[in-house]
Amino acid sequence: MARPTIGDFRSTDQNKPRVPTVPSSEVETSVSTEPTPPDPDFLTPAEKYRKQLEVAKIDLKEAEGIYDAVLTKGYYEEYVRFRGTHRAVFRTRTYEDHLRLQTVLEMQKPQLAISQDELITRYNLAASLFEWDSKPLKHVTEEDFDALLLLLRKLPGPVFSVLARELSKFDAKIMAVFAEGAAENF
């Protein structure tokens, strides 16, 4: 029994060798002696992670502190200062907060993207805001959460926007710290 042919890779008679488009003298002079940055496709997960932290301007020591705080205390919190003595404290959200948001999205079914974005922002802000204007905010019961939603609705629009923008930065930092490769670094 004859072996089956897997493929015929012979060239046709009309197939001519390729001619270089750049004269060889130009190719030799354009070779750089500068070291090339490592190809991102060949970085280890730990190296990719460190590169992502560098792009996000997060020091590895700070990332380690955030990672450890979430694992040991169950949360990480950060102060955000506003003009004068005004400040907010943001804390990482729990899975329970995620489920609450998911439930309200399913119940309200916002039709417009802007309505959905506003609802997500408001619920995430209420779940993350643990202090506002030097006053601690409770997060023990659902009534506490409803009171936080009411507090946010009564804020001046520009203040709400600033809080939402700062929360977005906070969330981006947390996502960068817990990105793929974090476990290999800590």
Image (spheres, rainbow, N blue to C red):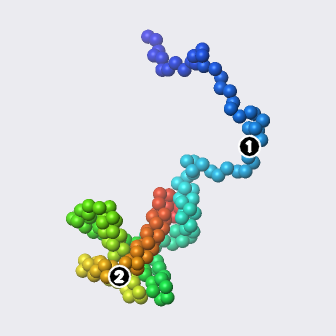
Q: What label sits on residue 12 in the rendered view?
A: none
The one nearer the camera, 146 or 152, is 152
- Residue at the spot of label 1: 31
Q: Position of residue 96 (x, y in %)?
A: 30, 69
User: Disc 2 residue type?
Assistant: Leu
Is 177 placed left or right of 114 in the picture? Answer: right
16 on left or right of 185: right
Q: Residue at x 54, y 60 (%)?
A: 52
> Is residue 107 visible in the rendered structure shown here?
yes
2 displayed left or right of 125: right
Which residue in the rendered view is the most extreme toward the top? 1
Q: Secondary structure at mark 1?
A: loop
Residue at horizontal 50 percent and vertical 58 percent from the top? 181
Outermost residue toward the left in this view: 107
Disc 1 marks a residue whose amino acid type is Val
Secondary structure at badge 2 equals loop
Where is residue 58? Give x, y as percent. 55, 68
At a point 41% along the width and 87% down the height, the residue shown is 133
Please tell me which residue is depicted at 28% across the width and 80% down the height of the picture. Answer: 150
Against 71, residue 29 (above or below) is above
Residue 26 in picture, x, y percent from top left: 76, 38
Query: In the visual, does 178 lie left or right of 111?
Result: right
Residue that badge 2 annotates: 155
Decide: is 119 above or below 1. below
- The quadrant the N terminus occupies is top left
Mark 2: few/some/many CA within 10 Å (<14, 14-19, 20+): few
Mark 1 or mark 2: whose residue is earlier in sequence? 1
Q: Quadrant of the rendered structure where residue 88 is?
A: bottom left
Instruction: Please rate how many residues cluster around mark 1, counting C-alpha atoms within 10 Å: few if below 14, some from 14 to 19, many from 20.
Output: few
